[in-house]
Amino acid sequence: MEWSDVRIFLAIAREGSLGAAARRVGQTQPTMGRRLRALEASVGQTLFQRTPDGFVLTDEGAAVMASAERMEEEALAFERQLDGRGSTLGGSLRLAASDWFGSYVLTPVLAEFARHHPSVTVELLTDSRLYSLARREADLAFRIQPFDEPDVISRRLLRMPYALYAHRDQPRLRKGGRGARLVTMNAAFGGMPDVAWLKQHLPEASVAFTSNNREVQARMCVQGIGAAVLPTALGDAFGELKRIDLGDPLPSRDTWLGYHKDLKRLSRLRRLLELLAERFPG
């Protein structure tokens, strides 16, 4: 049994299909299928049931899942500890952040880093998924909540202010928001502080558009669809928008960065952390 085949097994178990698993590990779908068949032949068991909805673990597959995950933990620890001792600046760094934060906050910093360290390849992943630092899905992650994973070193990077924005040509908002239209977070993010702020201060306004994507909200606001609460780093980037002051400031949000403790000596990561500390001193 080869560890690389166990890695294939875990990817299929987590993704539920050969195609998604292939994208996760950077292989082709035919290769994934061939490697899975080789693994099943080597252990003499069928590990997955092939169904119209995807791949489902058999009883035998479910029985060895925990053991496979322990193998993964040890293999990844091996890789992290070796990488963490690397003193050269060459290599790659994978970062994970939300879409707007990556575009409007990190991009200028990463551009400067790339100019000073051309031998380092930086990959920035921008979506709402929480990438695992232990599984090396990301080397450095940025989140709006503190990290609670074991063995992760984290610190607060910055406190991001928010403001209410509208198109510059939009009439002044009436008290309570009567007749106003809003662009806001969708139902999945209805517990966000800015959503509660809008309900409190503009209870008579109607919701015109919702999205889980802050940049999409900003662009709909630019189109005049409605007023939106946006991080100031995002809202101020659009010249067509103006801030609206209702006399009560919006709640700000902390952004945290985190990385696995095994990578704390990784030179290219340390250089990036130093640059981030310079640009965002607290």
Image: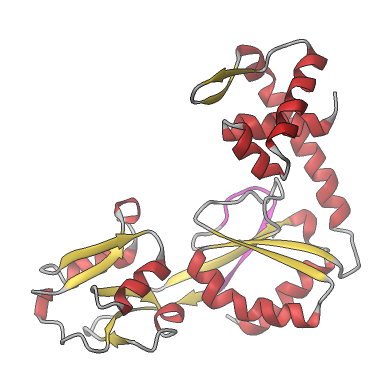
Q: Is residue 214 left or right of residue 195?
A: right
On whether residue 253 falls in the magenta region, the answer is no
| Residue at the outermost front position | 30
Q: Residue at x 78, y 58 (%)?
A: 263
| Residue at the outermost top position | 44
Q: Position of residue 81 (x, y in %)?
A: 85, 51
Q: Residue at x 54, y 59 (%)?
A: 146
Q: Position of residue 4 (x, y in %)?
A: 81, 34
Q: Position of residue 141 (x, y in %)?
A: 62, 60
* Magenta span of residues: 147-158
Q: Residue at x 29, y 61 (%)?
A: 210
- Count of marks placed on residues: 0
Q: Is residue 142 visible?
A: no
Front residue of this view, candidates 86 and 225: 225
Q: Is residue 230 left or right of residue 29?
A: left
Quarter of the image for residue 205 reads: bottom left
Front residue of this view, candidates 31 and 266: 31
Front residue of this view, candidates 122 and 199: 122
Q: Is residue 55 visible?
A: yes
On whether residue 153 falls in the magenta region, the answer is yes
In the rendered image, the vertical position of residue 273 relative to residue 63, given as above or below: below
